[in-house]
Amino acid sequence: MSPIHYVALSVILFVIGGVGVLVRRNAIVVFMCIELMLNACNLAFVAFARMHGNLDGQVIAFFVMVVAAAEVVVGLAILMAIFRARRSASVDDANLLKY
Amino acid sequence: MTTLHTVAATGALKLSWLLLAFPLFGAVVLLLGGRRTNRWGHLLGVAMPVAAFVYGMIAFFTLLGDTDRSQDQHLYSWIPVAGLQVNMNLLVDQLSICFVLLITGVGSLIIIYSVGYMSHDRDRRRFFGYMNLFLAAMLLLVLGDNYLVLYVGWEGVGLASYLLIGFWQYKPSAAVAAKKAFIVNRVGDAGLTLAIFLMFAEFGTVSFSGVFGSVKSGGSGVATALGLLLLLGACGKSAQVPLQSWLLDAMEGPTPVSALIHAATMVTAGVYLLVRSNPILAVTPDARLAVVLVGTVTLLFGGIIACAKDDIKKSLAGSTMSQIGYMTLGAGLGPAGYVFAIALLLAHGFFKAGLFLGAGSVMHGMNDEVNMRRYGGLGRVMPITSVTFGLAYLAIIGIPPFSGFFTKDPIIGADFSEHGAAGKVLGTLALIGAGITAFYMTRMIFMTWYGKRRWEPEAHPHESPAVMTWPMIVLAIGSVGAGAFLILNDRLQKFLAPVVGVPPTSEGVFSTAGLVALAFALVGVALAWVMYGRVPVPAVAPRGRPLTVAARKDLYGDAFNESVLMRPGQWLTRLSVFFDNRGVDGLVNTLAAAVGGTSGRVRKLQTGFVRSYALSMFFGAAVLVALLLVVRL
């Protein structure tokens, strides 16, 4: 089995996510793009685990999912707090912490 | 040339610490007692020096009756460390007892006089406290049996003189004069300090007996260095050229202070140091020559200044410089001169104290006027002062049988017989000095006591109270008799012989040099009469010839110090301040400014836009990955 297709899909998903993080202003969308990048990584991990025939990559994928879930909890809470305070979910509006 | 042999103190001399304890007790009580001692403070201030004098007399007669006249009393071990043992010992021998009697005797008379002189001063108690401190320090100076204890007294004298010269510190001139005296003295003190260091380094001891015992084997280089350093110390305390400038300004203090500084304490300390260190000087003819030169220059220098001053106290101060110059000259002549230096010092203690107290008495009656051109004709209104002043005058110019004749002229005589051709030149200069002395003293007499009354309109001169006149009378008796008493039958010479050695030859009292000096003195008197006695003295000083103008400005001593020492010193400080500001501070400040400026620019990158941070992270990660790939390949 050749992993090349899986890796290609993973790269496409990762780039979409990365570009989304860089160009989108809406914090929810930026968040979703980060999830996309994480899942692109998961795809690559699982694909390589399958290729090598061991479970290491799959275990790592589970770890990533757990971390992503925790991150979503904290991140969404922060987002809610910011939205309540400023009536906006734009990441560019939250720029007070600077020089 | 003798070395010091001492025995442990016995009998009455076991209590020699009392000499120090009396005035020190007075000083402590008066200075710490506060206002509650105001009422009786001056009485204690008088009683303590008198008590010390009485004990000094007892000690003196005990010494006279004793065969071993050099007694050392061990008080306690001061610095007991390996390699250096310094004991707090008091040395009562022939030399120190002479000084003790002079200091406490003349000091007591001056302090009694101060009761009258300072009676209207607000701070009379403080004054008597300082005077007692002065006497205590001076007694410690002459009684210490090693150079370190001497040094403590030496510094104590410097401190007390600072406090007393600046006693009226609300006058800026007095405050400046006090500072000047202290600072100039510090220069001399540096010489003494270095001498003590050198003794410790070379001989491992600072005690008189230890140093004198090993100085002969220490090589002439060390002895010459020691002699010159001690001379520097003596120059500071005794106001010898080139450290003379403080003495004339020191007249800012109350007149009894001037009398005490000039007659009994302070300026005599340098002569004491030189005479006490005679075993060191004996080894080094070079240092002795330097001492003689300093003495000769100073005796002329002081005399010339005294001739031009219209301020009676400053004129007397110049006279002191000149007389101390004679003593230094005597101390530089070796065994031929030590005895006469000490004799002149003791006689000078009497007549100079008498002159100063007389001047103080005149000032007391003349609303503190010091300008002799505003005196004149005071002989009638102040008979006692004028007679005592006159007797002291006859003593200082060396008219026989007054004390100056017996004590000063032998120094001139000894000068001629020493040092070959140089001695002839220096002796001639000393003779001229005798003429100058007679001139300025006669000038002072004519300007003060004779002639027309040139007083300020509000002046009402009157004779001083008995508490001031009696000390002057006693001092006048001393001025008349001290010289003859000390010199005739070689009394002082025999007494001091164990400490300073015996003069090689004694020419007798009426030596050729003495008679020539007398002739010079008479010429000086005649000249002064022609200039100030025969013609009326103008109340405002005429412009004067160049030498007079120079002498009025202390022969440019201050100008010299200012241009040679002070200005370059200021330049040096300015240079170092400049270097500090621009060099050291500049380096540090530039570095700090560079860091600050750079970070000020760099921090603009912190925009607060999360997406730009993400972009930079993205590029950073991309670059890292690319680099990893490059390295792998």
Image: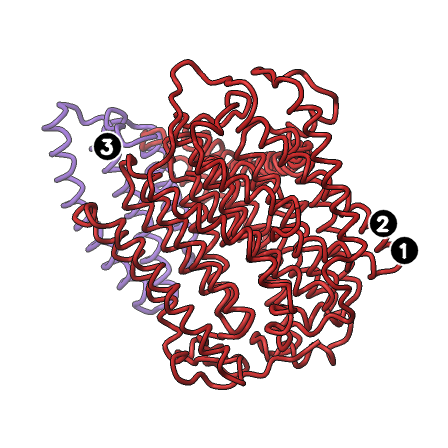
Q: Which quadrant of the figure contains the N terminus of chain B?
A: bottom right
Residue of label 3: A29
- The answer to the question of whether label 1 and label 3 lie on touching residues, with beta carbons closer than 8 A, is no
Q: Position of residue B43 (x, y in %)?
A: 26, 52
Q: Is residue B152 above or below residue B581?
A: below
Query: What label does residue B421 carry, if any?
Result: 1
Query: What label does residue B476 carry, if any?
Result: none
Amino acid at the residue labelled 3: Val
Residue at mark 2 shares a chain with residue at mark 1: yes
Residue at mark 1 shares a chain with residue at mark 3: no
- The answer to the question of whether label 2 and label 1 lie on touching residues, with beta carbons closer than 8 A, is yes
Residue of label 2: B425
Q: Is residue A25 above or below residue B56?
A: above
Q: The purple chain is which one?
A: A
Judge by depth and name the residue closer to the eye, B207 or B64: B64
Q: Which of marks 3 and 2 is in front?
A: 2
What element does badge 1 sit on? helix
Label 3 is found on which chain of the structure? Answer: A
Judge by depth and name the residue closer to the eye, B130 or B330: B330
Compute the Cα span from label 2 to label 1. Answer: 7 Å
Compute the Cα span from label 1 to label 3. Answer: 115 Å
